[in-house]
């Protein structure tokens, strides 16, 4: 079923979907509310399951140029002077899962996707879109779009896919789905110069520092000569002004390393309340959702964007192959929902484990130590080793680009 597909949202999920659909020859019109590709956020970890898809879509070179393959993850329990264990990444990840585990700036990934999309004449990205309305019917969808210049454009297509993020209008308005739920945690993010934290953490690795009710994740972005800091802390009530400095539970002294890291970012922290989305309804008729719009999760396994990328790579061939978008969405739901739910559960459990208080934290530390530097490769093989199933079309009439096979 080639034809025209409308995608709301030019985030990582929406752009990946646009690219995958365009590679099959479909026409894609992406509606983005912002005036440009969003620069929000800071660092992003891209695990092999997502990286394989992005590489297949032709992004390998761009991502290698802008990312870093960290050698490992240094785990620092509360106030520890040296890492309890270093979990191997680097070559170990490539050997185990056939693709790198990388860290990069989110804007660099978004930019690489955007540039890849721009090479396709069959992808049109409309920025500054004010609003849109969509109706699903037997022949596909009809849409009206209020564009940035105040004009209204009408269109018809095969399907409308909402990749419009955690507070998705597609989910709430068109699918009658739930609002996102605040998860009692806030992420404070900052970028600091290399020099300001040298000597505190390894500049070729990810570092994770545990505290009671908070943890700090740090990793270098050498391409920008910056270190990404993300501090996650329990915050029961979100107020309008969360401030530009993390609020940490006061019960324990923080230790010198974390003090230096927090101070390095001064008042430049950006608070990011964490919301989750749980809904079984990912489509109605020829309208569907993917990425955070369908299943925003807490970021404690660093998989939210990866799941959006997997969604896109699963959905695109189904939309092309199936007789109707509705049939494609049904298969996509069946193929994705169990896996996404498992990843969301794993992330939520990590959140509890990372934030444990003494003496439970002692048991956690012992468990991490026993797992050693390679245990995570076995424990998380189901996650990182996953490959999106793309089956050839039954009637053999469609040409699948080899990059997506
Ligand atoms: C602190 C933190 C750290 C994270 N770390 C990682 C990590 O290391 N690895 C990882 O894989 N994931 C990580 N994540 C999760 C990841 O950032 C998200 O899962 C991912 O960005 C979701 O992408 P998306 O395209 O689905 O949604 P979004 O990025 O939210 O994109 C939605 C797009 O839709 C647009 N939009 C919204 N409403 C409309 C509308 N009505 N019409 C048109 N356009 C609209 C928005 O402007 C935006 O461009 C992290 C998240 C947080 C908060």
Image (cartoon, rainbow, N blue to C red):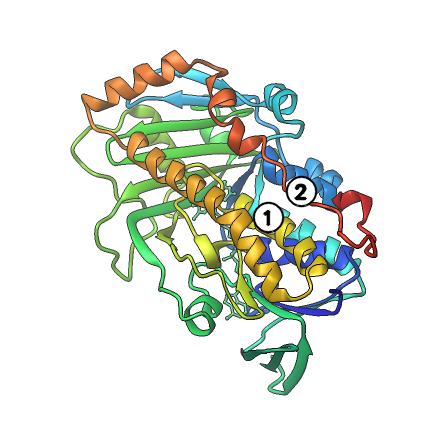
Residue 309 marker: 1
Residue plotted at (48% across, 15% down): 373
User: Pointer 1 and pointer 2: residues touching (CB < 8 Å)?
Assistant: yes
The one nearer the camera, 71 or 30, is: 30
Q: Is residue 40 above or below residue 144?
A: above
Is the residue marked by circle 1 packed among few (<14), some (14-19), or many (20+) residues within 10 Å? many
Q: Is mark 1 within 8 Å of ligand 1?
A: yes
Question: Is residue 72 found left or right of 322 in the rendered image?
Answer: left
Relative image position of residue 144 (x, y in whole percent): 60, 83
Image quarter where the C terminus lies is: top right
Tag 2 secondary structure = helix
Name the quarter where the N terminus is drawn: bottom right
Label 1 secondary element: helix
Q: Earlier in the sequence, mark 1 or mark 2?
A: 2
**CA distance separating discs 1 and 2:** 7 Å
Say above or below: 198 vs 346. Answer: above
On the image, the x and y values in percent for residue 53 come to: 67, 42
Q: Residue at x 44, y 38 (%)?
A: 229
Image coordinates of residue 366 in percent, x first then y, are: 31, 14
Report the front residue among 294 and 61: 294
Q: In this rendering, would 84 be left or right of 124? A: left
Determine whether 210 is above or below 178 in the image.
above
The residue that mark 2 highlights is 53
Does ligand 1 reach within 8 Å of label 2's beta carbon? no
**Residue 356 screen position, x and y as percent:** 25, 29
Q: Quadrant of residue 256?
A: top left
């Amino acid at each position: 079923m080639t034809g025209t597909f409308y995608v709301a949202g030019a985030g990582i999920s929406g752009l990946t979907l646009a690219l995958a659909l365009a590679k099959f020859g479909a026409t894609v019109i992406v509606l983005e509310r912002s005036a440009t590709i969003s620069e929000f956020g800071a660092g992003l970890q891209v695990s092999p399951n997502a990286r394989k898809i992005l590489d297949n879509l032709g992004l390998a070179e761009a991502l290698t140029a802008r990312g870093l393959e960290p050698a490992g993850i240094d785990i620092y329990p509360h106030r520890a002077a040296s890492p309890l264990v270093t979990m191997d990444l680097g070559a170990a990840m490539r050997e185990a899962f056939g693709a790198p585990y990388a860290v990069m700036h989110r804007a660099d990934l978004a930019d690489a996707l955007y540039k890849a999309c721009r090479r396709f004449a069959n992808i049109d990205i409309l920025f500054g879109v004010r609003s849109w309305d969509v109706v699903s019917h037997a022949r596909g969808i009809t849409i009206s779009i209020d564009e940035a210049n105040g004009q209204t454009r009408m269109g018809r297509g095969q399907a409308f896919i909402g990749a419009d993020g955690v507070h998705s209008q597609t989910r709430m308005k068109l699918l009658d789905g739930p609002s996102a739920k605040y998860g009692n945690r806030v992420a404070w993010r900052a970028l600091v110069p290399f020099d300001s934290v040298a000597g505190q953490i390894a500049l070729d690795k990810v570092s994770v520092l545990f505290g009671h009710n908070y943890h700090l994740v740090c990793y270098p972005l050498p391409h920008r000569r910056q270190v990404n800091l993300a501090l996650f802390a329990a915050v029961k009530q979100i107020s309008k002004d969360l401030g530009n400095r993390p609020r940490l539970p006061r019960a324990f002294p923080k230790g010198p390393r974390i003090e230096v890291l927090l101070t390095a970012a001064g008042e430049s922290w950006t608070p990011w309340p964490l919301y989750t989305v749980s809904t079984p309804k990912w489509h109605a008729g020829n309208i569907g959702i993917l990425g955070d719009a369908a299943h925003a999760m807490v970021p404690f396994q660093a998989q939210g964007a990866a799941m959006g990328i997997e969604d896109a790579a699963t959905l695109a061939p189904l939309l092309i192959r199936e007789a109707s978008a509705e049939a494609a969405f049904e298969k996509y739901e069946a193929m994705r929902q169990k896996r996404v739910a498992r990843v969301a559960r794993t992330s939520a459990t990590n959140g509890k484990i990372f934030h444990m208080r003494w003496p439970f934290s002692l048991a956690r530390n012992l468990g991490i130590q026993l797992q050693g530097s390679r245990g995570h490769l076995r424990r998380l093989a189901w996650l990182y080793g996953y490959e999106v199933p793309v089956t050839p079309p039954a009637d053999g009439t469609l040409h699948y680009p080899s990059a997506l096979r």
